[in-house]
Image: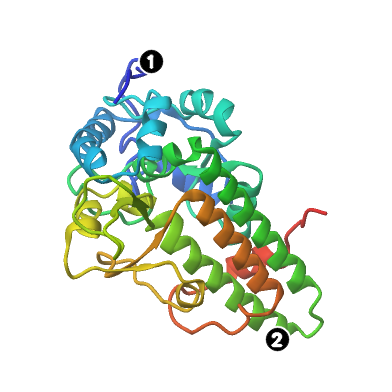
Amino acid sequence: MGSVLRSETSVDAPAAGGLTTTKAPFIEEARARSEIYIHQPYQLYSAENHETWRRLFLRMAERWRRYANPQYLRGLDALFMDHEHVPRIEDVNRFMQPLTGFRARPVSGYVPAYVFFDCLRRREFPTTVTIRDGRALEYLPEPDIFHDIAGHVPMHTDRAFADALVRFGECAATAARMASSVSDEAEKLRRLTSNIKAMSRFFWFTVEFGLMRASGAAGVADGGDGQALKVYGSGLLSSHGEIAHAIDAPEVQRYPFQIEWVVNQYFEINHYQPLLFIVDSFDHLYRLVDELEDWLRAGKLDNVAPGEPAVKEQDLRSFLEAKIPA
């Protein structure tokens, strides 16, 4: 992978706890003030935080070369990402924004569903600034900056993938617009809950845990037609164990993407995924998001199967209170 942009700021003694996930006073204070959007307080990263990033990046490098899709690898090179220190988000944006218009935007943690999807529509990606505890590299109680910056963001340098994310945000706006037209409050909440569940499942099995055909590439698993598979989902791209498991493990079920299956398929987040879906390309992914919106408009997402993920009250409220674009 290509040249590396190094941080020019020295890492001096930070506040106690640094910016470790679930242990960062800066984040707790922002959440107490109900602040979603924040700045990246770079001076608060501890030496241990930077060492955790270095270890994560080092051990993923070989896995990325073996299992990641080519667009991801090109994106990683294009961002000149620091291998030794937690990257500055402003530096990442300096390289990414000219390519696709996308930029990472620091957040304090959980972002309500509509707010998150609408960020995608505006070519912004909500990005966590904390980093996992270095004593448990595989354990992730919530998304961290390695998941977001090393897992998601390199994909945002690819024009077709970035455009698919924007379409996903537009699909969420359609869901909010349709909900606003339902007069019966109970029916509105029922339909909206089902719509959010369907969109969340679609996002999970694509952007977070998606596989892609890669004709002519080396790989163990294939899509049933002799074509090797590569990873493009960020949940896989940021996990040392699961990226290999997704491709190599014989017990993982891998099927061509079928929208009627995906929107009705529940998932659990506390173990490796036993079921994954395959797209042909990012142009194919874009067309699938178009199809998702068609299903939404036709009412075919109003009664999806129950089960995970749970739809939080904040998610429903974010759609009901959305400032919907014209």
Residue displayed at 58% across by 34% down? 100
Q: In the picture, which quadrant includes the C terminus? A: bottom right
Between residues 53 and 3, which one lies in front from this camera angle? 3
Q: Is residue 148 left or right of residue 123?
A: left
Question: What residue does disc 1 label?
Answer: 9
Q: Position of residue 75 (x, y in %)?
A: 41, 33
Q: Earlier in the sequence, mark 1 or mark 2?
A: 1
Q: Where is 189 relative to 238, above or below?
A: below
Residue displayed at 65% across by 75% down? 192
Q: Is residue 11 left or right of residue 206?
A: left
- Whether residue 129 is visible, yes or no, is no
| Residue 204: quadrant of the picture | bottom left
Q: Amino acid at mark 2?
A: Ala
Tell me the mark number nearer the camera, choosing from 1 and 2. 2
Between residues 220 and 16, which one lies in front from this camera angle? 220
Q: Which mark is residue 205?
A: none
- Whether residue 250 is visible, yes or no, is yes
Q: Are marks 1 and 2 in contact (CB under 8 Å)?
A: no
Q: Position of residue 94 (x, y in %)?
A: 52, 23
Between residues 53 and 306, which one lies in front from this camera angle? 306
- Secondary structure at badge 2 equals helix
Q: What is the crowding at mark 2: few (fewer than 14 residues within 10 Å), some, or many (at least 20)? A: few
Question: What residue does disc 2 label?
Answer: 186
Q: What is the crowding at mark 1: few (fewer than 14 residues within 10 Å), some, or many (at least 20)? A: few
Q: Amino acid at mark 1?
A: Thr
Q: Where is 225 relative to 148, above or below?
A: below
